[in-house]
Image: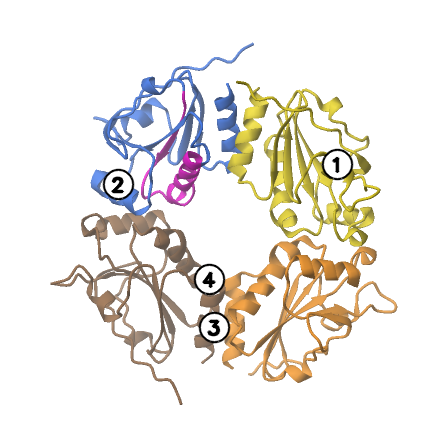
Chain colours: A orange, B yellow, C brown, D blue
Amino acid sequence: MVESYREAPEISASAWLNTEEPLSLRALRGKVVMVHAFQMLCPACVMQGTPQASAVAECFVDEPLQVIGLHSVFEHHRVMGVEALRVFVHEFRLAFPIAVDQAAENSAVPVTMQKLALRGTPSVVLIDKQGLLRFSHFGRLSDMQLGGMIGQLLAE
Amino acid sequence: MVESYREAPEISASAWLNTEEPLSLRALRGKVVMVHAFQMLCPACVMQGTPQASAVAECFVDEPLQVIGLHSVFEHHRVMGVEALRVFVHEFRLAFPIAVDQAAENSAVPVTMQKLALRGTPSVVLIDKQGLLRFSHFGRLSDMQLGGMIGQLLAE
Amino acid sequence: MVESYREAPEISASAWLNTEEPLSLRALRGKVVMVHAFQMLCPACVMQGTPQASAVAECFVDEPLQVIGLHSVFEHHRVMGVEALRVFVHEFRLAFPIAVDQAAENSAVPVTMQKLALRGTPSVVLIDKQGLLRFSHFGRLSDMQLGGMIGQLLAE
Amino acid sequence: MVESYREAPEISASAWLNTEEPLSLRALRGKVVMVHAFQMLCPACVMQGTPQASAVAECFVDEPLQVIGLHSVFEHHRVMGVEALRVFVHEFRLAFPIAVDQAAENSAVPVTMQKLALRGTPSVVLIDKQGLLRFSHFGRLSDMQLGGMIGQLLAE
C-alpha cells in the first residue's frame, strides 16, 4: 500500500519581502520547499523557528531547496502589519523570501494558514519536488529531525 | 583613593507596564536596582538581554533587588509604540515592571536613555542601595559576570 | 559523470560493548551505517560528538540505520583501556554498540582508524545501504547537516 | 539572630596538579575559595560542573578568589587514578589547581569528601575570606546563582 499525498495549495500573499517577484509553488516544481509559518511577535517563532529556517537555508544552499517564510498573523493584527514586519525582517537579518499571508474576509485566520490547516505558529510545511504536501508540523522540531526529512525529500 | 559615583538620574516614563504605580528610584533606596534597557524589535534584546533580565528577577527573588525594564525606542518608532509593546510583553510573558522611556522633543533618542548616556540596546544599568550609578554596560554580559556584580551590590 | 565510491573496510575490533554479537558491515547491508569514532578522554567527543551519536540513534530509531561507536585510541593508551571504557559507557549512558578499535602492531594508531584513514577524533563515517563509503568527516558537524546527509542515504 | 558557620576543614590530598606547591585553606585566608568536587568520568561534572569552574576562575580573575578542583573518587577507583586524571586535565585544558582527594583506609569515600560531608559529584563548596564554610551544594547551579553568591562573599 502506497501512501498518497495531496498537492500543496498555492500561497496566497498580499505582499512579498526579500524577493523581487512573488514566488509560486507551481514554479518551484523540481525543488523541495520548506514553508516556515510564523508571527513576528510569537516567542517560539523568534527564538527557535525563524533562526532554524535561516539555518536550513544556509545548510542546504547548494541543494534544490527553497525556504519560504509565511507571515500568518491570526492575532494582534494591528501591531504585526507589513510595516512592522519589514522592520523585524531587517533587524533580524532574515534573508529568505517571506510572504505576507492574505487576510481572510470573515476570519482572523489568514487564507494560506486556512488552506494549509495550520494549528498555530511556528509551523513547518514540507513540499516535495512534485508539489505534494508531505509534512506539516506545529511547534518545535529538532534540527536533526528536520534535516533528516529534508534530506529524504532531496534524495527522491 | 576611593571611587565616587554619581546619583542615578530618575526614570522619565510616558507609561508603565506590569505595575499599578509608577516606580521611582528614590522610593527604591535600600534596594539594588537593575535597569534593562531594550527595544522590542532588537534581536540581541529579545534573544539574550530580556530573557536574562527575567532570569535575574527569578534568581534574586528573595533579595532586595528590583529589575526594571526600560523600553528606550530610538529607531523605528512607528512600529514599537506602547500598543505593540503590550503585545510583546504579554506574548513573551515578561513579569517585571517596564517603563516606556519618554520621547524627547528634539531627538529620536528618548529622555532616560539620554540621561543615562546609553549607547544602544540592550544595556544594563546597576544602581546600588544608596541610589548611586555603579555600572552601565552596552551589549552582552555573561550570567556569571552579571550575577557576580549583583551579588556584590547586594552584600554592601 | 557518476561519482564512484569504494566499499567501506570492515571494522577490526578487539572487543564489543553494548551488543551480544560483534557487528559486521557486511551483515548490515540494507541499512545506513554511521560510525562515530571517538576517544573517551577527547573533549570534543565527550561534549559534542558522542551526544550527537546518541541523538542520531534516537532520532532515526524507526529507520534502517545503525549507529556504531568506534573507540579508536591513538594516544594515552594506558588510561583508555577497555575497563575504563566500560565505566565511561556506563556512566554516560551510551546505548549504541561500540567496537574497541584493534591495536596495531607497529603503530599507535589502531587498525580500523588506519583503514578508514581517519585524521583524529571525533570523526563521522557514513556508509550507504550497499556498503559504500559515502562520507567521512573529522570534527564538528551541525545536527542539521548530519541529519540531512543521513536522510539522503536513507531515501536511496 | 546571626547565623554562625563552622570553619572549613582542611583539604587532605595525596597529590596536587596545576600547582607547584600544595594549597592550604589556612594560607588562603583573605580570599574566597570555591571548591569544585568532581570525578573525571562523572557526566554532570564533565559537561557542566567542570566547565563552570573554569568559567568562575576566568570571570573573577581580578578578584581575591581561588578555585580549587577536588578529585573525589568514590567509585570506579581503578580507572580514575592520578595518571588518568593527568590526561583528563591536559586534554580538557583545566588550568586551576586540583587536589587528588586522599583515599580513606576503610571507605570507598575519600577523606576530604567525608570531612565536607559531600553527597556526590559535582559539588560546589564556598568558603569565605575568614575560612568559614558558607555554602555546599550537590548538583547543578546556574551561572547566575553561583556568580551571585561569589559576588556576595567577595564584597564582605
Callouts 2 and 3 in the same chain: no
Within the magenta stretch, is there residue D47? yes
Rendered view: B154 above or below A104: above
Using the rendered view, name the quadrant where residue D78 is placed. top left
For mark 1, give the secondary structure. Answer: helix
Which residue has dot 1 on it? B112
Q: Secondary structure at mark 3?
A: helix
**CA separation, marks 2 and 4?**
30 Å
In the image, the segment drawn in magenta is: D31-58
Tell me the quadrant of the picture where the N terminus of chain A can be found. Answer: bottom right
| Mark pair 4, 1: CA separation | 43 Å
Is residue D142 visible in this depiction of the protein? Answer: no
* Amino acid type assigned to the residue bearing label 4 in the image: Ser
Residue for badge 2: D85
Q: Earlier in the sequence, mark 4 or mark 3?
A: 4
Label 2, label 3: how far apart the Cα atoms are: 40 Å
Amino acid at the residue labelled 2? Leu
State which mark lies toward you, 4 or 3: 4
Residue B48 at what x, y percent from top left? 60, 46
Give the residue at the far right of this rendering. A106
> Do the residues under discs 4 and 1 have CB atoms within 8 angstroms?
no
Residue D9 magenta: no
From the top left corner, tell me how far across and down residue B94 is, in percent: 70, 42
